[in-house]
Amino acid sequence: MQSRANLTYAGHATVLIEMDGVRLLTDPLFRRRVGHLRRQVAMPDLAQWRRGRGPIDAVLISHLHWDHLDLPSLRLLGRTTTLIAPRGAARYLRREEVGHVIEIGRFESLRIGDVLITATPANHNGQRTPFGPKVDSLGYIVRGSYEVYFAGDTDLFPEMAELGEDLDIALLPVWGWGPTLGPGHLDPLRAAQSLVDLTPRLAIPIHWGAYAPLGMGWLQPAFLRRPPHAFAAHVAALAPQVQVRILQPGQSLRPFPI
């Protein structure tokens, strides 16, 4: 078994998790334009990701919002890709012919190769607007040689205290794609507060800096670049035992342990 693990942050909520010979991709978003949003950072090189490493074993879909469930990005991965999605999403995804769908509910688990994937709650309205299905939003814990928590999109929720017993790494959203946040999101302070319960060894801020509404790219310092640094400052005050590592889109963390 290959025990070495790597994380590559592609931007927004997209992270490539490689552990124990298994390659998982979270909420893939590989487009320069998504509706009114424009990508502000370089696109990941999918061909380079595949070269020498093999295909993606599974995609973890946290919820059905357009910036987390992007059908064109899923099609880039191929129709045989395994998609792990919230319960109730399969009918919609199968109709779109984007992959082999496995539904999962909160606290349910399944195994992909040598890693165990467990769905966790998330405090976020994940309906596919305007007429798509309304299903739960999820996070995921990936357990193998290390334990990695991908929070998806969420605000604080009581069950967070149950997730933090053995976490090595928490991938936490700290912002979004605009100058303000709606309900159901973590900002830098609330993301730092979550670490009091989660207690991972390492926290990596995600969901920041990659996309902005058309015409707002010039505001980058205000709402694209500052959130991960504000998060790190809050963590130093609230959970100083947790190390923070800020990965720029395209950067990798390798190898574990930290």
Image: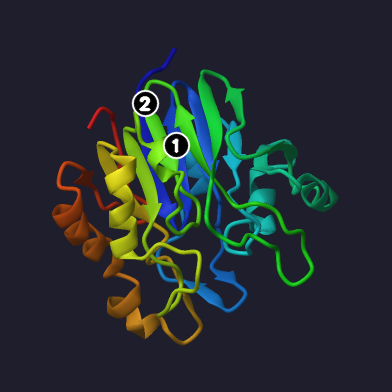
Q: Estimate the x, y position of residue 217 in percent, counting from the top left.
A: 40, 81
Which residue is under mark 1? 17
Residue 130, position as x, y percentages in the image:
75, 72
User: Residue at 26% of width from left, 53% of height from top?
Assistant: 246
**Rendered image quadrant of residue 58:** top right
* SS type, badge 1: strand
Tell me if mark 2 has few (under 14), some (14-19) or many (20+) residues whose alpha carbon lies within 10 angstroms of its own: some
Which residue is outermost to the top?
A: 1
Query: Which residue appears at 64% of the width and 58% of the height?
Result: 70
113 relative to 40, above or below: above
Q: On screen, 8 above or below 20?
A: below
Q: Residue furthest bottom?
A: 215
Q: Quadrant of the N terminus?
A: top left
Foreground of the two, 178 or 214: 178
Residue type at mark 2? Tyr
Q: Secondary structure at mark 2?
A: loop
Disc with the residue nearer the chain's start (1 vs 2): 1
Q: Nearer the viewer, residue 115 or 78?
A: 115
Give the Cα separation between the discs numbered 1 and 2: 11 Å
Amino acid type at image mark 1:
Ile
The x and y percentages for residue 20 are: 44, 21
174 shown above or below 162: below
Q: For the point 35% across and 23% down, which residue is it?
A: 4
Q: In this image, 96 relative to 10: left or right?
A: right
Q: Is residue 142 left or right of residue 56?
A: left
Quarter of the image holding residue 160?
Answer: top left
In this orientation, does residue 50 appear? no
Pick the residue in front: 6 or 157.
157
Q: How many marks?
A: 2
At 29% across and 34% down in the image, what residue appears? 254
Pointer 2 residue? 146
